Amino acid sequence: NMYIHEAVKKAVKGGGAIYRTSVKPTGESTYGAIKPTNSYDSCLFVVLSRGMPQRSCRDWAPTANDLMADDWEVEF
């Protein structure tokens, strides 16, 4: 588990997406992740199913709890 700045750095370097382990449903193959970018799309919210992107929307806005959480992971 990581803080958001650690997960973002790793995701940007490797082209991955980040998610919170406390939010990802256990045993589910479909969940949401965040693709951090430096583009005008901002951070993309991506729905992944079995690790493959299904759909996305731009301008993800984190909560204060998201920014302070230490349960971030990276999905490649």
Image: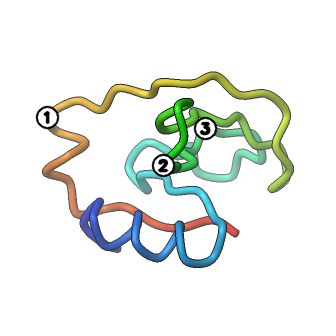
Say if mark 2 contacts mark 1, CB within 8 Å: no
Q: Position of residue 26 (x, y in %)?
A: 59, 51
**What residue is shown with label 2?**
38
The first of marks 3 and 1 along the sequence is 3
Picture residue at 57% right of the left edge, 35% below the top: 44
Amino acid at circle 2? Asn
Q: Quadrant of the C terminus?
A: bottom right
Q: Quadrant of the N terminus?
A: bottom left
Picture residue at 66% right of the left edge, 67% below the top: 15
Cα separation between marks 2 and 1: 21 Å
Of circles 2 and 1, which is in front?
2
- 16, above or below 69, in the image: below
| Residue 64: mark | 1
Amino acid at circle 1? Ala
The first of marks 2 and 3 along the sequence is 3
Cα separation between marks 3 and 1: 18 Å
- 12, above or below 66, in the image: below
Q: Which residue lies furthest to the front in this view?
A: 40
Residue 13: name its quadrant: bottom right
The first of marks 2 and 1 along the sequence is 2
Task: Assess disc 2: are there few (<14), some (14-19) or many (≥20) residues with their C-alpha within 10 Å of its C-alpha.
Answer: few
- 26, above or below 75, in the image: above
